[in-house]
Image (cartoon, helix red, strand yellow):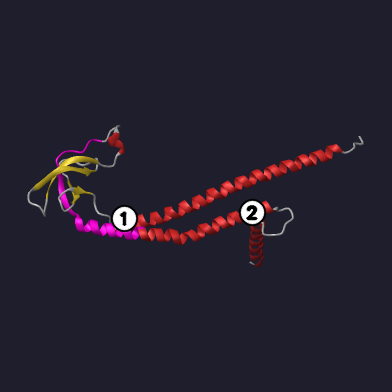
Amino acid sequence: MIEEWEAIGMTGSMRTRRWWRFAHLRRNPLVRGVDRLESGLLAFAVALAILSVPFAVSIGTSNFTQLHEQSTRQLADRHAVTATALADAPIAGMGRIATEQTTKVPAHWSESTLPGRADGDIVVPPATKRGDQIQIWLDNTGAVVRAPLTANDVTIGAICTGLLTWLGIAGALTGLFLLARAGINRGRYLRWHREWQLFDTNNHSGPRFW
């Protein structure tokens, strides 16, 4: 058991040393200033990505408030009624209907808040048959509208907004770091090329004894 813990400790120590070397935090004479600059830019980008999390959360929270208010208004202005399909929905085939999840058919419904009966086209699944009953939503004027936002819609929308905000920031930081590293690598390769040329010149410019 003790040997296993010692092996785990050695492995962790090796990983720590590798990360230490990768970060160029040691005063290694083989590590140049440009290498430390690259590591510093990476650390800076990671730090900004972490610090942007509260900002993304605030954006998501603000979006949650807006969506919640929108849902409240919709619930106050819209009400559900039951409509009856007057025709079969188009049969899914090889055309456009086969790739759609909804289609429109004529229908009629009884409006509870307005006198008489209303007719119009409503959105239904492709498998809808004539006589099927479908729940639809109407506004205060009796016009067919979309269903109001639910609590799940509000929550998912806010989470997606916050997550996409953070991913956008992280993606931008990653792109900037990659551009900076590409420039650093070009400079690094150019210096290596010059040093190899100088090394080759020095080796071939002296006297030869063979």
Residue 208 percent location from the top left of the image: 90, 36
Q: Check if mark 2's residue and mark 1's residue have beta carbons within 8 Å.
A: no
Residue with the mark numbered 2: 37
Under mark 2, the amino acid is Leu
Q: Quadrant of the C terminus?
A: top right
Check the image and name the residue furthest to the top.
Answer: 94
Viewer-closest of 6 and 95: 95
Viewer-closest of 13 and 68: 68
Q: Residues within 10 Å of mark 1 (few under 14, many from 20)?
A: some
Q: Residues within 10 Å of mark 2 (few under 14, many from 20)?
A: some
Q: Residue at x 13, y 44 (%)?
A: 119
149 in magenta:
no
- Which of label 2 and label 1 is nearer to you? 2
Residue 192 percent location from the top left of the image: 72, 43
Check the image and name the residue furthest to the bottom.
Answer: 2
Residue with the mark numbered 1: 153
Left or right: where 42 falls relative to 21? left
Report the disc number at residue 38: none
78 in magenta:
yes
Under mark 1, the amino acid is Asp
Q: Earlier in the sequence, mark 2 or mark 1?
A: 2
Q: Quadrant of the N terminus?
A: bottom right
Residue 103 percent location from the top left of the image: 24, 40
Circle 1 — which element? helix
Q: Residue at x 28, y 57 (%)?
A: 70
The magenta region covers 63-91
Circle 2 — which element? helix
Residue 40 percent location from the top left of the image: 61, 56
Toward which corner of the image does residue 55 lie, by quadrant? bottom left
